[in-house]
């Protein structure tokens, strides 16, 4: 990659001149040591970036990057993705009513149903996401509004949450568990998928809600306050977050391993997104045990939404996404395109440098000969 | 009340010094003068405690903190820290507090330690025992208890505890010998005299009975000036007043030699002593690099402020609607909501400032300081700068100017001792036109006296014989040389009688030694000065004795010295020797023409010439002279003028005897060095006090002027013929015409200018006409700029500094370097940007006041061309790289604000913010700035023109700075938008796969930041790797080591739930990122894309517009391989093993 020349200098401490005077060493101890470091003569590799040396590097990068890019692009294109917006902005949208008459803490859930059609079958595991737009999960006030030690099961923090949680720290003079703005705004729509058989029957598709959070988050970072298996007792003196309909110990009453702070939907929500438009994993649709039929065959589907989460006040959007994944994750043509582009640019630059090298390299060499 | 008294009072009060008086009066032994004597104002004197320490135990912390925060950078970081403490800011105060605390603590510990050492040194000095005479007995006490007026007894080899006036010594003649090695580095013994009237008080008891007062001036720092008067009161007699001069004053720090003991009275004590007054630190010099660094800092500060302002404004436009400001999921606290909007905006502005403040890193200052401090060791360690003869290597007095050595445009050099060896050798003398040449000396052994006179013209005559005798005697008598005996026990007489060289001569002027030694070789040996009698062994082995009556000392204004002696026959004789220009006009008879011709001929050959003259005084004349001298010496005020006047009267109507010629050989490789400096594009000026012909000859010999050089003269001789005005315009026309005709500066005729002191002062003199003088000055500068070499002769020390200042302040503001070896060069050394002292024979004053001291002139070549060049490219890269890496670091944060609602959300975790500059990216650049060598030392030495590549601060100019900044901005955009498109999931998903558990996962904002940060750390480190041309094993270790450290740290930082943190946001973030394939792919991609433009730019520039340095880089290795292929073969294994 680089022009290299090994430039080794005398570093053995025996220059012929200095040792000539016999008495010099004994009388004049002020004389500096003749070490390679002190004399700045450490042996060194001296690479120089010249057209001749950089050329092959550019070609090599080009030759490596373009195949990788093509591979990534093809893989990404093979991933099937389906997205549906259920915000209900249009009057024609089934969810329009729900989005209009929105009241916090309403007892009667508003549901709406969206039919959609998959043109292609989805093979293997299918991942179901919800997506939000214009939702600033990365706002500073929002990001810091949490108490990690409370979420880790610390008893004192449970009773006395961190000041960072303000103004979602206490309600009715009782500490909120889990406190803070992030927890308070937990996404609480319920999404359900139904497959419409060609014969017209409506089959619910099984959605797996375990394994959607980081393993370390679920098992180490988030913990229910210890001491008692009965979460009702543990959270006795705390108050539920203001916007929640049910307290934290009722997030998943059926599964004690998914209840309280270690509820996976909750954990996923607590990992704040980097950008204002984001998607979060909601459920996994496991592939069928018999490999004969695809996980989601092509055909008609119905998405049933229990519409709880208001986004229209800040002009946000809500989406449901279905996607398969590959070894490189979800659909992401960007990487492939970028690799192909960079590879081509490198190749092109290589050619340009080759021309320049031929044109100027000779001229320089001939110019240097008189010297 | 008298008005004048009132006025006096007012002026005194206004001056703020109530008890200020011009002189102080000291009562010797604290005995009041008898009534009737003048009444003196009593003054309070400080005690003899020396305080060189800055702090005490109590004021250390406040005072040191105050000193440190006076530095603008520290103050800035303190402000940021305070802002972080007071308001709610995105990053915790630790991120800026910790580095600041670290820097402040390290500096404080260093300064505290240094001060503790000073305290210890002070203590040992202040408590060292001294002998004080009290009530007729010697009392042992501690040094700091000495009060002004105490009579102190000092024994041989003891150091004087304060400034003393010598009263009497154990020698009969009341003299004592002193060395001032620790004061000015001169090791020769100097003689000090007691006032004749106090010599007789030689015991403690007698001392106690002395009743006298000393009047002297208030303390002043000049070591060689002192004016005072002693009044001695005796019972029943009138008080006797005697003058006191520098020859009576024993300075603190000097050591008593060859004298058993002395009695002396303390007159200046403690911080009033001349030594303490001389400790005042020199003014701080700042390098050009530091100045441009500060300019860049200001530019970045503007960038920082504008960033913060832009973001604040955008924030408030964006959150105009409540939905954006406070959506339902993200409410403000009550307190926040109640704040006034202006206060909120201001707080937001400050918060943005804090968020972006890392763009000006604390660590840059620390790294620059460390680089300078550690880097300067390479000069002291360099064996090429070591002189075997002197036994000393180069010495670095300040490390602030290392890189300035690579920027020098003008070199001002002294001639004597700098270009020349200052080892004088007597060549010949000429008596009335007859020339005498002593035989060559063999290894210092003097040939026998009789055979050593070689007369060229032997036509003896009575008159001539007479003059010859006088001439040799004059040279034997008219000097201030001392004889130092090797073995005092045997007695000097014996040794000298046998003709064995058991004694040698010491003098502050090497010319005098050369003359006296030359006389010895011609048969007249100066034996010694005993009891005011000078003894000479003449050609016939007879001892002649002359009574030494007066010495009219040499000074640089008169440029001559004289002695008045009384011969054994009772004649009073005045012998005078001095520069031809100062002696010849005072001569009334003698063969002036022949001598003058010879002198001029010698001068052209580069020899130093002196003229010798004499004058016979009648007893009346002598009495008259005596009277005048003692009168002048008694004067308290303006004694110098009085003395000069008296000397002037005496040194008149002389009879010329002859002239001498002394050779001062060129230093080895002086010519080679000057040639290299010329090739490197520096202009070399020689500033000397010597006469024009001699100096010009030296200049030719040292190749400053070549045969082809056209010499322009601007001397007194010429201005006498024409007016200064005409000469100046004439010269400028010559120079400029040629310049415009040929157009290029390379091929045109080079000019050398010779100017002398008198003309220079005429040129620089501010004339009353106003515009005229400025005109002259400009024309002069214009002429100088077009001359490749300039010789200024007949310069006074102050004029040397004036010249340097003139060039320094000319409109291009060139970097100047002054090099010299003597005390007369100190002013110019202090004035120039870089001052270099040569550890010469004329004492160590120049070396002590310089920034760098080297043993020989030839070492200038390596220190400038090699060390200077290296230091410059190192520090230039250091500065540019620091700004670059912090732009890369902070600009993504700025971009992120557009995507997080301008909420000051930091992109990186606190640990990364804090450690980025401290540990992840600090060591590689520090190491680079210490050991980078872009071309080999040999190449730099061989090809001085490479120096032009770095001249005029070329690596720190605005275009280069803008290139680096743009590169930083580009890289930052690549980092941010690369990660953004990867994460932006309107079209793309950001899922990766955890390979071990096959679990689907989502990335949050901290992963986003960590991804960017990882790319950032790798990119900036690899960028430095690309810039490194010299890869030693240390470079490999540090560069790969710091990348490894980053990875290990991140794994550790995210691997544990840290119990002391109140957030766990980084938990497993780094590991999760590494387990995702796209993250790896994008890291590689982004690094390649960020580095590509720089590589392409480098390669293109190198191929299409290569600089000389780059050519040398590509050619250099080939040449070394050819010349030392055996070495390469044998060493390649060790090289490859890295």
Image (cartoon, rainbow, N blue to C red):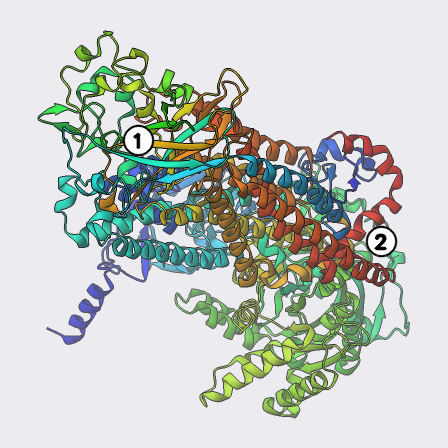
**Which chain is disc 2 placed on?**
B
Between the C-alphas of marks 2 and 1, the distance is 117 Å
Task: Say if B639 sits above or below B976 in the image.
Answer: below
Q: How many marks?
A: 2
Left or right? Give the position of B1135 relative to B22: right
Task: Say if B978 sits above or below A292 in the image.
Answer: below
Asked if labels 2 and 1 share a chain, the reply is no
Left or right? Give the position of B693 relative to B400: right
Q: Position of residue B532 (x, y in %)?
A: 60, 55
Q: Position of residue B436 (x, y in %)?
A: 84, 67
Q: Is residue B810 visible?
A: yes
User: Which quadrant would the C terminus of chain B be assigned to in this image?
Assistant: top right
Taking depth in this image into account, of B323 and B536 the one nearest to the observer is B323
Taking depth in this image into account, of B497 and B901 the one nearest to the observer is B901
- Regarding mark 1 in the picture, which secondary structure is present there? strand
Taking depth in this image into account, of A105 and A137 the one nearest to the observer is A105
Residue shown at 58%/72% (left/top)?
B558
Residue shown at 70%/53% (left/top)?
A348
Asked whether the residues under the numbered discs 2 and 1 touch, taking CB atoms below 8 Å apart as contact, a structural biologist would say no
Q: Is residue B269 visible?
A: no
- Regarding mark 2 in the picture, which secondary structure is present there? loop
Residue B263 got which mark?
none
Residue B441 got which mark?
2
Q: Which label sits in the foreground, 2 or 1?
A: 1
**Which chain is disc 1 placed on?**
A
User: Which quadrant would the N terminus of chain B be assigned to in this image?
Assistant: bottom left
Decide: few, some or many residues near mark 2? Use Cα within 10 Å; few <14, some 14-19, many ≥20: few
What residue is disc 1 on?
Answer: A304
Task: Say if B794 sits above or below B384 in the image.
Answer: below
Q: Position of residue A142 (x, y in %)?
A: 27, 37
Left or right? Give the position of B1125 relative to B109: right
């Amino acid at each position: 990659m680089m022009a290299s020349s090994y430039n080794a200098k005398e570093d053995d401490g025996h220059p012929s001149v200095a040792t000539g005077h016999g008495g010099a060493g004994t009388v004049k101890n002020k004389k500096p040591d003749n070490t390679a470091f002190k004399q700045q003569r450490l042996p060194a590799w001296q690479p120089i970036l010249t057209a001749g040396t950089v050329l092959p590097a550019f070609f090599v990068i080009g030759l490596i990057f373009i195949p990788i890019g093509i591979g990534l692009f093809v893989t990404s294109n093979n991933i099937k993705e389906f997205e549906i917006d259920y915000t209900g902005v249009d009057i024609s949208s089934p969810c329009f009513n729900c989005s209009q008459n929105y009241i916090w803490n309403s007892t009667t859930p508003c549901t709406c149903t969206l039919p959609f059609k998959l043109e292609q079958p989805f093979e293997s595991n299918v991942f179901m996401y919800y997506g939000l737009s214009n939702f600033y999960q990365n706002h500073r006030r929002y990001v810091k509004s949490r108490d990690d030690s409370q979420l880790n099961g610390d008893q004192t923090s449970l009773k006395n949450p961190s000041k960072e949680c303000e103004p979602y720290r206490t309600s009715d003079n009782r500490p909120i568990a889990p406190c803070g703005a992030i927890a308070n705004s937990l996404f609480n729509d319920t999404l359900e998928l139904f497959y419409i058989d060609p014969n017209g029957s409506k089959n619910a598709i099984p959605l797996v809600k375990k394994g959607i959070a980081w393993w370390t988050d679920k098992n180490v970072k988030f913990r229910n306050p210890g001491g008692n298996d009965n979460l009702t007792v543990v959270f006795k003196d705390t108050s539920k977050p203001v916007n929640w309909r049910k307290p934290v110990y009722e997030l998943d009453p059926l599964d004690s391993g998914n209840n309280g702070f270690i509820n996976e939907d909750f954990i996923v929500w607590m990992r704040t997104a980097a950008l204002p438009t984001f998607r979060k994993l909601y459920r996994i649709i496991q592939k069928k045990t018999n490999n004969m039929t695809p996980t989601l065959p092509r055909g008609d589907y119905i998405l049933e939404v229990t519409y709880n989460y208001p986004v229209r006040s800040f002009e946000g959007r809500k989406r449901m996404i279905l996607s398969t994944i590959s070894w490189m994750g979800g659909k992401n043509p960007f990487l492939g395109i970028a690799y192909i582009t960079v590879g081509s640019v490198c190749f092109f630059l290589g050619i340009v440098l080759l021309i320049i090298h031929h044109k100027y390299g000779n001229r320089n060499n001939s110019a240097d000969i008189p010297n | 009340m008298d008005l004048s008294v009132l006025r006096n009072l007012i002026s005194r009060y206004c001056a703020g010094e109530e008890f200020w008086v011009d002189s102080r009066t000291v009562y010797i032994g604290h005995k009041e003068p008898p009534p009737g004597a003048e009444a003196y104002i009593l003054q309070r004197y400080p005690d003899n405690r020396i305080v060189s320490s800055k702090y005490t135990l109590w004021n250390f912390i406040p005072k040191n903190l105050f000193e440190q925060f006076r530095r603008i950078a520290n103050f800035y970081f303190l402000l940021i820290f305070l802002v972080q403490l007071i308001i709610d800011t995105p990053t915790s105060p630790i991120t800026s507090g910790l580095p600041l605390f670290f820097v402040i603590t390290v500096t404080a510990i260093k300064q505290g330690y240094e001060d503790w050492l000073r305290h210890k040194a002070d203590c040992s000095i202040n408590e060292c025992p001294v002998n004080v005479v009290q009530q007729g007995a010697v009392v042992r006490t501690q040094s700091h208890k000495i009060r002004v007026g105490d009579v102190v007894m000092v024994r041989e080899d003891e150091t004087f505890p304060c400034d003393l006036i010598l009263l009497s010594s154990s020698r009969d003649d009341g003299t004592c010998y002193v060395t001032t090695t620790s004061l000015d580095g001169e090791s020769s013994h100097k003689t000090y005299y007691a006032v004749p009237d106090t010599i007789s008080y030689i015991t403690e008891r007698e001392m106690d009975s002395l009743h006298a007062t000393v009047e002297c001036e208030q303390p002043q720092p000049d070591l060689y000036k002192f004016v005072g008067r002693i009044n001695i009161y005796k019972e029943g007699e009138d008080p006797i007043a005697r003058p006191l001069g520098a020859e009576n004053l024993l300075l603190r720090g000097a050591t008593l030699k060859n004298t058993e003991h002395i009695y002396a009275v303390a007159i200046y004590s403690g911080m009033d002593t001349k030594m303490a007054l001389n400790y005042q630190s020199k003014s701080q010099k700042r390098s050009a690099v530091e100045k441009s660094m500060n300019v860049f800092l200001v530019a970045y500060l503007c960038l920082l402020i504008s960033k913060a302002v832009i973001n604040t404004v955008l924030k408030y436009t964006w959150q105009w609607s409540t939905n954006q400001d406070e959506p339902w999921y993200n409410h403000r606290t009550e307190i926040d909501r109640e704040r006034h909007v202006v206060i909120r905006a201001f707080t937001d502005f400050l918060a943005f400032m804090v968020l972006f403040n890392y763009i000006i890193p604390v660590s840059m200052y620390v790294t620059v300081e460390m680089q300078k401090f550690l880097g300067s060791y390479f000069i002291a360690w360099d064996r090429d700068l070591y002189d075997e003869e002197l036994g000393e290597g180069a010495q670095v007095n300040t490390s602030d100017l290392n890189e300035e050595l690579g920027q020098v445009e003008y070199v001002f050099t002294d001639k004597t001792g700098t270009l020349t060896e200052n080892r004088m050798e007597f060549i010949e003398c000429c008596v009335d036109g007859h020339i005498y040449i002593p035989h060559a000396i063999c290894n210092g052994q003097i040939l026998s006296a009789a055979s050593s006179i070689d007369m060229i013209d032997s036509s003896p005559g009575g008159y001539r014989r007479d003059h010859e005798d006088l001439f040799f005697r004059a040279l034997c008598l008219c000097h201030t040389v001392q004889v130092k005996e090797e073995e005092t026990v045997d007695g000097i007489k014996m040794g000298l009688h046998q003709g064995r060289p058991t004694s040698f001569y010491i003098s502050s002027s090497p010319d005098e030694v050369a003359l006296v030694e030359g006389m010895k070789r011609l048969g007249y040996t100066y034996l010694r000065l005993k009891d005011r009698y000078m003894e000479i062994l003449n050609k016939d082995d007879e001892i002649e004795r002359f009574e030494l009556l007066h010495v009219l000392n040499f000074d640089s204004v008169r440029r001559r010295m004289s002695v008045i002696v009384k011969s054994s026959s009772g004649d009073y004789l005045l012998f005078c020797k001095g520069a031809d220009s100062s002696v010849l006009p005072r001569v009334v008879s003698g063969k002036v023409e022949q001598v003058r011709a010879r002198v001029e001929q010698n001068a052209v050959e580069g020899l130093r010439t002196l003229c010798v003259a004499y004058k016979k005084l009648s007893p009346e004349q002598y009495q008259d002279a005596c009277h005048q001298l003692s009168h002048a010496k008694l004067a308290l005020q303006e004694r110098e003028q009085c003395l000069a006047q008296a000397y002037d009267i005496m040194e008149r109507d002389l009879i010329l005897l002859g002239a001498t010629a002394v050779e001062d050989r060129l230093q080895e490789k002086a010519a080679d060095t000057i040639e290299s400096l010329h090739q490197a594009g520096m202009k070399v000026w020689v500033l000397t006090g010597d006469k024009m012909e001699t100096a010009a000859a030296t200049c030719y010999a040292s190749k400053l002027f070549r045969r082809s050089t056209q010499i322009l003269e601007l001397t007194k001789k010429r201005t006498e013929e024409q007016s200064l005005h005409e000469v100046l315009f004439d010269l400028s026309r010559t120079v400029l015409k040629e310049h415009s005709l040929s157009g290029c500066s390379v091929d045109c005729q080079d000019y050398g200018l010779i100017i002398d002191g008198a003309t220079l002062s005429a040129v620089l003199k501010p004339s009353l006409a106003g515009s005229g003088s400025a005109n002259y000055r400009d024309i002069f500068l214009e002429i100088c700029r077009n001359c490749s070499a300039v010789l200024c002769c007949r310069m006074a020390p102050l004029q040397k500094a004036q010249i340097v200042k003139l060039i320094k302040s000319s409109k291009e503001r060139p970097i100047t370097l002054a090099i010299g070896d003597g005390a007369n060069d100190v002013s110019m050394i202090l004035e120039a940007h870089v001052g270099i002292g040569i550890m010469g024979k004329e004492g160590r004053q120049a070396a002590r006041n310089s920034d760098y001291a080297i043993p020989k002139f030839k070492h200038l070549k390596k220190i400038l061309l090699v060390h200077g060049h290296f230091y410059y490219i190192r520090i230039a890269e250091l500065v540019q790289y620091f700004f670059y890496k912090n732009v890369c670091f902070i600009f993504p944060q700025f971009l992120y604000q557009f995507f997080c609602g301008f909420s000051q959300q930091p992109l990186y975790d606190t640990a990364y913010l804090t450690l980025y500059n401290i540990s992840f990216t600090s060591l590689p650049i520090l190491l680079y700035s210490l050991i980078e060598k872009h071309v080999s030392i040999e190449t730099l030495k061989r090809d001085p023109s490479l120096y032009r590549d770095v001249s005029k601060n070329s690596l720190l100019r605005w275009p280069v700075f803008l290139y680096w900044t743009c590169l930083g901005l580009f890289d930052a955009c690549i980092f941010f938008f690369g990660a953004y498109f990867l994460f932006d999931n309107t079209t793309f998903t950001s899922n990766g796969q955890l390979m071990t558990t096959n679990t689907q996962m989502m990335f949050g904002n901290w992963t986003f930041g960590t991804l960017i940060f990882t790319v950032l750390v790798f990119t900036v480190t690899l960028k430095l790797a690309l810039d490194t041309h010299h890869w030693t094993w240390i470079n490999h270790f540090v560069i790969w080591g710091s990348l490894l450290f980053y990875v290990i740290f991140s794994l550790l930082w995210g691997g544990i739930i840290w119990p002391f943190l109140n957030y766990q946001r980084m938990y497993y973030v780094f590991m999760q990122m590494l387990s995702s394939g796209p993250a790896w792919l994008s890291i590689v991609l982004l690094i390649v894309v960020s580095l590509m433009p720089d590589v392409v730019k480098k390669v293109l520039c190198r191929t299409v517009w290569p600089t000389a340095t780059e050519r040398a880089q590509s050619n250099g290795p080939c040449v070394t391989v050819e010349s030392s292929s055996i070495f390469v073969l044998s060493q390649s294994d060790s090289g490859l093993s890295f």
